[in-house]
Structure formats: C-alpha cells, structure tokens
Image (spheres, grey):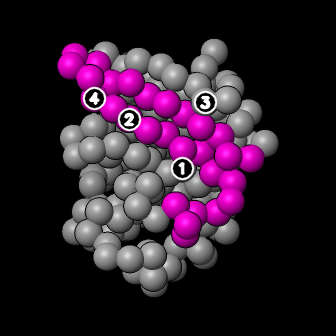
Amino acid sequence: MPASLRLVTLEDTSRFGRRLAELLFPGAVVGLVGPLGAGKTTLVRSVAVGLGADERVVSSPTFALIHEYPARIPVYHFDTYRLADAESILALGAEEYFSGNGVCFVEWADRFESTLPAEYLRIEIKPSGEFREVTITGRGPAYEAVACQLSN
C-alpha cells in the first residue's frame, strides 16, 4: 500500500531524505517521478548527505546523465530526462549499477519503468501550491517495508 506525506519546507525534504538514507540498503533502487522543479534532485542530495556524501558535489546530472557520489553506501544518480528510449539508459550500464552495491536514484523513472528492476522504491513528488505531496510505493517486500517505515 502506498504511503503519502506532505513536505512543506526544504527542511521537511531534508528530514525525509535523511530518514530515507537510514532505511536504504546496498543494491537499493529508487525511481523518482515528478515534474521539473518538483524537488527530485533536492531529495537525492538529502539522501546522499544522510549517507555521508559531500553536499557540495550533489547536483542534477541532466547533462552528465549520471553522477556518482562516494558515501557509506555509494550513490548513483541518473537523470533520464534527455534520453530518447530504454536502450539509452541500458547503454549507460544501468543494469550493472542496479545489481551493484550502491544506491541508485533514477529521475524521470516513469519514462523507463521497463528498465528498472522488478523490485524498487517509487517516489512520486507532486508540487501543490505551498507544499509537495509525496507518494511512496514499494515494489517488492524489502521496498514495501521501507515505504511502511516512511509512513510512520
């Protein structure tokens, strides 16, 4: 069952990201969905910092397509906005990243869900006036447990 929450401030997003960092595990895949400016990269920055990455190096990989951040668990941050098709994300080596020991974040995941593993965490961010509505859906038992923890 999806979990929902409302983020009002940047500090709310930061807290949510740090909480998510506590629950993620090596090999975790997180698909991020939301329009431009929804806060996807801000969330990744918060999680990466929660995992011990340097906040100053976390940025949107729109032009690089993927950024890697050293942390307690390495963070791999994909931005698929500019990719034309599923073969493009696979050409980046996505399957190797997904089966590795890091945590993978895929922005615009709804465009290429067929390339994601069968089990992953889906986070949809919808801006709504002064806040953001966040829906977290776990696909698979480990991710359902994470979604449940985040709803508490």
| Circle number at residue 127 | 4
Residue at the location (59% across, 59% down)? 102
Q: Are marks 4 and 2 in contact (CB under 8 Å)?
A: yes
Percent x, y of residue 20: 55, 33
Task: Report the quarter where the N terminus lies.
Answer: top right
| Circle number at residue 125 | 2
CA–CA distance in space, label 1 to label 3: 14 Å
Q: Are marks 1 and 3 in contact (CB under 8 Å)?
A: no
Amino acid identity at mark 3:
Pro
| Circle number at residue 2 | 3
Residue 131 in magenta?
Answer: yes
Percent x, y of residue 47: 47, 39
Amino acid identity at mark 2:
Ile
Is 88 or 48 nearer to us in this picture? 88
* Residue 119 sits in quarter: bottom right
Q: Main secondary structure of the magenta part?
A: strand
Q: Which residue is mark 1?
A: 30
CA–CA distance in space, label 4 to label 1: 19 Å
Is 65 or 141 nearer to us in this picture? 141
